[in-house]
Amino acid sequence: MVRISVVGTGYLGLVAAACFADLGNRVVCVDIDEAKVASLKSGKVPIWEPGLQELVARNTAAERLFFTTDYREGLAGSQFIFLCVDTPPLDDGRPDMRRVEAAVTSIAASVTHQVVLVNKSTVPVGTGEWVEERLASGKLAGSPVSVASCPEFLREGSAVQDFMYPDRIVIGCPLPDVAHRVAELHKPMAAPFVFTDLRTAELIKFASNAYLATRISFINHIARLCEATGVDVQEVARGMALDSRIGDGFLSPGLGFGGSCIPKDLQALRHLGRSYGIDTALPDAVLSINRSARAWVLEQVQELLGNCMRGAEIGLLGLAFKPGTDDLREAPAIDIARELQRAGCTVKAYDPAALNKALALLPDLVPARNAWELAEGADVLVICTEWNEFRHLDMKRIASIMRRRILLDGRGVCDPAAMRKLGFVFRGIGRGQAWERGSGQRA
């Protein structure tokens, strides 16, 4: 049984801790948030993530998973310390490093034994070297504390699965023996290892998420061209994806990317480029296209309702930035709701996981308990999140209870022809609504 400490019980830290404990290790989570620690000790998990609640409960009951606010208690006897604190973006795109700096300071003041400090937080290139210098300049000078970088690549909604069955495990460390100790800890995951230095490991994380963002914005740009030319973007994407050089990952057009990772990491990569005097035209364009993807909804509502927009009732199907999570950070639906409210619309919403969180951000939002309550009397329905339950709605019933049958599909859930057959005025991102297929006439 390996003794592990995890600093930070946010999304990353709690998933890592629960998964490491489930692999038979003894894991102690350290967090300075007393309320959060008390909640976790009582069995309440503050994060909506499939399988996580059960994982935490099972390993807490098995006395493999513990929680504390005390650094000395939490780090005592640990062989590995995983740094998993948040690094939210500052106004200029830089990651906010204050939590990392505070955690490293507390670790330096608490550790007196041999340990490997593994950073999983998303940090600027060069942070691992800064941590080494910080530890060397304090009371740990000359002590055998080693630093490694092991960036995470978890997707919200499938984080437990991603942690247990990763595509690869990147380990950055200047000491081969330490790198292989970190690898041994991850050996049960049965994934290929990438051994490299600290800086390379840190940049791999930014580069990976920035590339995914680029694919999303690219296909959204193509979607706009499809709308203008009467082409279906889903057919274009399918034709592209069959090319083995391209594949089908992240080629689904929609309202843009959100969440806590991809937008933040792209901004950080852009800031890094600017700090070195490198042209940032590519990340600038990716972010610009992402913003315009969200504006699509307001454009469609304005065009279809015109002077009837003020006072119109708009229903949002989904609020979370993606299905399988209650995370609203950078969620397109939140920006869309605000813009519609500014335009004088009454905005209702239903989401199976994120509704309560959304009400805290949007006090004027009208909550609905289900899709039927949302649709009743609505002028427009907008699919903002592709929850599975939205793929199997009785759309005939939905159409019968709406005031106006206007359906905007922001996630490629519906079949355009089937929706029009039911009497909907249908618009879907990139679904060629500028032209009726085969008619040569504008819709």
Image (cartoon, rainbow, N blue to C red):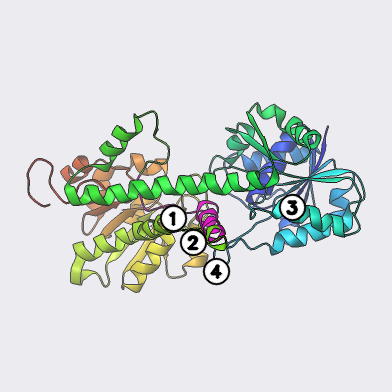
Tell me which residue sits at (35%, 40%) in the image: 391
The residue that mark 4 highlights is: 91
Residue beneath label 1, please? 319
> Label 4: few (<14), some or many (≥20) within 10 Å?
few
Q: What element carries label 2?
A: helix
- Compared across the picture, whether 295 is left or right of 267 comes to left
The amino acid type of the residue labelled 3 equals Glu
Q: Position of residue 248 (x, y in %)?
A: 39, 34
* First in residue order: circle 2 vs circle 4: 4
Judge left or right: residue 11 versus residue 267. Answer: right
Q: What element carries label 3?
A: helix
Q: Give the amino acid type for the residue marked by disc 2 in the picture.
A: Ala
Q: Do the residues labelled 3 and 1 touch (CB within 8 Å)?
A: no
Residue located beneath label 2 in the image:
358
Determine contact: label 3, label 4, CB under 8 Å.
no
Q: Give the label, 2 or 4, closer to the camera.
A: 4
Q: Give the residue pinned by disc 3.
A: 129
